[in-house]
Image (spheres, grey):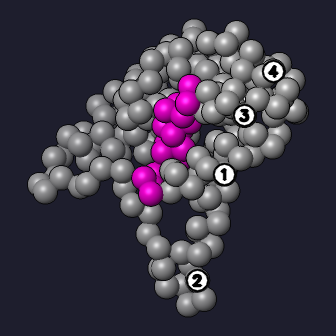
Amino acid sequence: MSLEDAVLVNRTLAGDRTAFEALVAGHLRRAQALARVVVRDAAAVDDVMQEAFIRAYDRLGTLGEPAHFPAWLGTIVRNEAVTWLRRNARRAHSLDGAQTRSLEPLAPEPLEPDPRLASLAAARASLSPAYRDIIALKYEADLDYLQIAETLGLSVANVEKRLYRARQALIKSMTENP
């Protein structure tokens, strides 16, 4: 898709708004998945996406290599998601420290907690952010290796290595802390 992306970027820079719409359509799912991984609030994903695509459109001229659009967009989405978290963390802890907004999980809590799921959640929380993100993109967002590579700006081989290491770390944590 990088050649197609490069053509669309160049057309957008030449003033073709429909080309940017095609870029958005082609990368929306991956960008949403990345935003979901960072903000963990399904309602906030749309806000993050809107800001990210506005920023991408405004700064498209700064993109050095048009074929690198997916990784460049991924950086913008991550930055916008982190900005959203910071902005809402300040709101959440207003004057008296009263919680005005809580971050909602993406999936509802099960009615009867499964101890294996609790163990998995604890093991996942112990992972480094890079491993947590790659696990979330693979298993929550259901992206394939190429899509994860484009989203994170990595090679497919690096994605495979990180996923392998993240899975090993999960297994180790779960066996050490059952």
Residue 51, disc: 1
Q: Earlier in the sequence, mark 1 or mark 2?
A: 1
Residue 94, disc: 2
Q: Which residues are magenta?
A: 25-43
Going by the numbered disc 4, the residue's amino acid type is Asn
Residue 81, magenta (yes or no):
no
Helix, strand or loop for disc 4: helix
Going by the numbered disc 3, the residue's amino acid type is Arg
Residue depth check, mark 2 versus mark 4: number of the one nearer the observer: 4
Q: Which residue is mark 3?
A: 17
Residue 10, disc: 4
Which residue corresponds to the image point at 70% horizontal and 40% vertical from the top-left?
76
Q: CA distance from mark 2 to mark 3?
A: 41 Å
Q: Residue furthest bottom?
A: 96
The secondary structure that dominates the magenta segment is helix
Going by the numbered disc 1, the residue's amino acid type is Glu
Q: Earlier in the sequence, mark 1 or mark 3?
A: 3
Could you tell me residue 29's position as x and y percent?
49, 32
Asked whether the beta carbons under mark 1 and mark 3 sit within 8 Å of each other, the answer is no
Going by the numbered disc 2, the residue's amino acid type is Ser
Question: In this orientation, does residue 132 appear?
Answer: no
